[in-house]
Image (cartoon, rainbow, N blue to C red):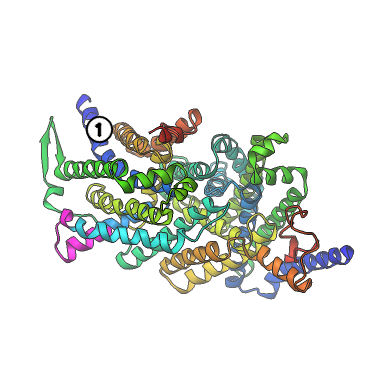
């Protein structure tokens, strides 16, 4: 039974991977692959957000700090070291390193406090970074930084970006999966359930939280650099965008907070939707109002997200209304969000 | 130089008084409902736009217009509570309410953009443009009037909280919701009214902000809310005295740094928050101090 399940899952994953790789060849129109590039970037950042916030329960509204810093790091390095052409992509590890390095002092300060105060500190740090980007000379002030021009043919210009973003997204999902299965992931979730009790059981909360925060920051920084090369410019309000923070949180909540596939699904729904809205209604206000309304609907009516709620529904259908395999009292915390959206049966 | 410092301190105290009023609303909501209302910033801007419409369309004086905008903001506040906040229960309530109020902020901002557009506007009146000569420098009358109004309202809020039956039930709810329920307090009603009052003060805050900030647009809410959050965290969440002290302290600090470099003034503002929290994670007057009152 378990073998069959595993086989189905593996088959589903292979199918998804083939579909993702074939996407730019099936739809070669740059207008369509554009959606793919953004969707993959956001799959990566939403999963990265989830690795820290989803597993530990500490909601960060400051991940744009890493995203913008990664973008700026790549841009400033290209400008000052005069790097051009395809060599600029060698700077992606640098962007990840910058994102991770910023997460260390950020985390050491913010992770001392919990709940509201933590969220507010992440917002405050976010604004400090945006203001610094405006005020420092090396960030180019309000004009920002521009990326070097890449001489790729216009028809397939998007494809390398798509595959880079896809690889980042796949890597992030793999990291997310590995963490969830590991002792480290168990410690993180123990902190989410009850930090004081976890400490009593021998978990070192600061070390665990900070490690997850750094991993999340590094991935987000890397994705920020790809985004920057693709967009070819970054300014303080676009690199450090308050809407970015909220969108990422919404993606994770829509799909399923703390699950592996939830943020992926959320990103695949929201990012193309947002792009479509901004493309079709030139004033961005409608998109913003709809985003807010969607957020309200999700939080009020679907607070646990599509994946857990859908998973339960499938389980109920499979077991034909009989109680689940384990009685609730004896069941450990349910494994939600196994890959490829399979039901919660175990 | 001495006069500049003098002026900066006066400015910090006067503007700080108005921020105190907005922050008291925010910290009051936190104390009773245990939620942070991220929409507070954009609600201030909404209040400013309401004053703007009343003064430009209907030619109603800014201060007289408050008689209309305060009840309007109160109704909006109770409506937000009734529609969205009331429904949230359970363990993740804290983060959920934060996200809900953030979403409300986004929607209001979007509507303000659609109605008023992205251009900066400013509230105008005779007392906004004319100044009084005071101790060697000029100060627009609006700063003084705004400060006096803010002080009057903070005192009124204080009396409401500490000298009335309703205030006693609010404080009881702040201290222990379950026990408050047990002694017969209608916690839902107290919560709705508190949220309404906390939002109603943004009408005043918005009017004074709109007249003194040198222009605002729908996007100004982000700047405001991040400052207000810094203030209430610094003062200690749920502490009204702390919010007052932190407002005056932060705004004075900002206007002092402003003499040296306007660009870095606001960065110092947040850096002060981070520094204080490293030393004292509960802020100036933490929760314990509130209980002792």
User: A226 or A99: nearer the eye?
Assistant: A99
Residue at image position (49%, 48%) is B178
Crowding near the residue tagged with mark 1, few <14, some 14–19, many ≥20 C-alpha atoms within 10 Å: many
Residue at image position (39%, 64%) is B110
User: A322 or A236: nearer the eye?
Assistant: A322
Q: Which corner quadrant of the image does residue B67 belong to?
A: bottom left
Q: Which element type, helix, strand or loop, lies under badge 1?
A: helix
* Residue A86 percent across, percent down from the top left: 65, 53
* Residue A318 percent across, percent down from the top left: 78, 72
Residue furthest to the top: B2
Q: Quadrant of the N terminus of chain A?
A: bottom right
Q: Answer left or right for A49 relative to A182.
A: left
Residue at image position (45%, 56%) is B101
From which residue to which does the magenta span run?
B49-64
Q: Which corner quadrant of the image does residue B116 belong to?
A: bottom left
* Residue A136 percent across, percent down from the top left: 43, 39
Asked if residue B31 can be seen in this view, the reply is no
Is residue B248 depicted above or below A319 in this figure?
Answer: above
Give the residue number, with chain letter if any, for mark 1: B8
Is residue A187 depicted above or below A43 in this figure?
Answer: above
* Residue B60 percent across, percent down from the top left: 14, 61
Q: Which corner quadrant of the image does residue A33 belong to?
A: bottom right
Q: Answer left or right for A5 relative to B65.
A: right
Q: Answer left or right for B188 relative to A72.
A: left
Q: Answer left or right for A307 relative to B292.
A: right
């Amino acid at each position: 039974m378990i073998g069959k399940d595993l086989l189905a899952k593996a088959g589903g994953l292979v199918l998804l991977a083939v579909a993702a790789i074939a996407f730019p060849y099936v739809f070669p129109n740059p207008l369509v692959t554009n959606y793919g590039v953004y969707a993959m970037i956001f799959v990566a950042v939403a999963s990265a957000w989830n690795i820290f916030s989803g597993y530990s329960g500490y909601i960060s509204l400051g991940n744009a700090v890493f995203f913008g810093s990664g973008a700026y790091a790549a841009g400033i390095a290209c400008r000052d070291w005069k790097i051009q052409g395809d060599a600029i992509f060698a700077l992606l590890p640098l962007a990840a390193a910058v994102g991770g390095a910023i997460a260390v002092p950020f985390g050491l300060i913010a992770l001392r406090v919990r709940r509201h105060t933590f969220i507010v500190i992440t917002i405050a740090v976010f604004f400090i970074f945006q203001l610094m980007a405006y005020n420092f000379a090396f960030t180019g002030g309000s004009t920002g930084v521009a990326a070097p021009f890449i001489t790729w043919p216009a028809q397939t210009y998007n494809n390398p970006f798509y595959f880079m973003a896809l690889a980042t997204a796949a890597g992030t999902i793999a990291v997310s999966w590995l963490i969830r299965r590991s002792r480290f992931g168990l410690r993180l979730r123990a902190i989410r359930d009850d930090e004081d009790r976890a400490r009593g059981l021998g978990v070192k909360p600061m070390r665990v939280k900070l490690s997850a925060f750094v991993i999340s920051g590094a991935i987000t920084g890397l994705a920020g650099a790809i985004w920057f090369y693709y967009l070819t410019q970054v300014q303080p309000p676009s690199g450090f965008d308050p809407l970015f923070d909220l969108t990422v949180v919404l993606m994770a909540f829509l799909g399923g907070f703390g699950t592996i596939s939830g943020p992926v699904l959320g990103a695949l729904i929201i990012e193309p939707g947002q792009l479509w809205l901004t493309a079709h209604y030139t004033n961005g206000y409608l998109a913003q109002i709809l985003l807010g309304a969607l957020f309200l609907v999700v939080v009020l009516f679907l607070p646990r997200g599509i994946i857990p709620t859908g998973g339960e529904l499938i389980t109920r259908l499979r077991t034909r209304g009989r109680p689940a395999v384990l009685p609730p009292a004896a069941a450990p915390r349910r494994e939600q969000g196994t890959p490829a959206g399979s039901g919660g049966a175990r | 130089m001495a006069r500049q410092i003098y002026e900066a301190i006066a400015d910090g105290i006067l503007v700080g008084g108005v921020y105190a009023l907005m922050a008291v609303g925010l910290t009051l909501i936190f104390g009773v409902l245990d939620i942070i209302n991220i929409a507070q910033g954009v609600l201030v801007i909404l209040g400013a736009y309401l004053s703007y419409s009343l003064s430009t369309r209907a030619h109603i004086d800014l201060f007289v217009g408050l008689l209309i905008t305060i009840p309007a903001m109160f109704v909006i506040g109770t409506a937000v509570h009734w529609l969205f906040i009331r429904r949230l229960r359970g363990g993740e309530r804290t983060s959920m309410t934060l996200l809900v109020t953030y979403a409300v902020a986004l929607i209001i901002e979007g509507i303000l953009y659609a109605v008023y557009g992205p251009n900066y506007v400013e509230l105008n009146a005779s007392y906004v443009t004319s100044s009084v000569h005071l101790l060697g420098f000029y100060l627009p009358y609006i700063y003084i009037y705004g400060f006096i109004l803010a002080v009057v309202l903070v005192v009124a809020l204080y009396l409401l909280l500490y000298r009335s039956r309703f205030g006693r039930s609010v404080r009881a709810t702040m201290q222990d919701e379950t026990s408050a329920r047990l002694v017969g307090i209608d916690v839902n009603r107290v919560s709705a009214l508190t949220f309404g009052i906390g939002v109603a003060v943004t009408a005043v805050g918005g009017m004074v902000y709109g007249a003194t900030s040198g222009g605002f647009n729908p996007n100004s809410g982000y700047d405001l809310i991040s400052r207000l959050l810094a203030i209430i965290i610094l003062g200690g969440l749920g502490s009204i005295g702390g919010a007052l002290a932190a407002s005056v302290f932060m705004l004075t600090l900002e206007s002092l740094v402003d003499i040296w470099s306007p660009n870095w003034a606001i960065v110092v503002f947040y850096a002060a928050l981070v520094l204080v929290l490293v030393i004292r994670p509960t802020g100036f007057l933490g929760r314990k101090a509130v209980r002792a009152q």
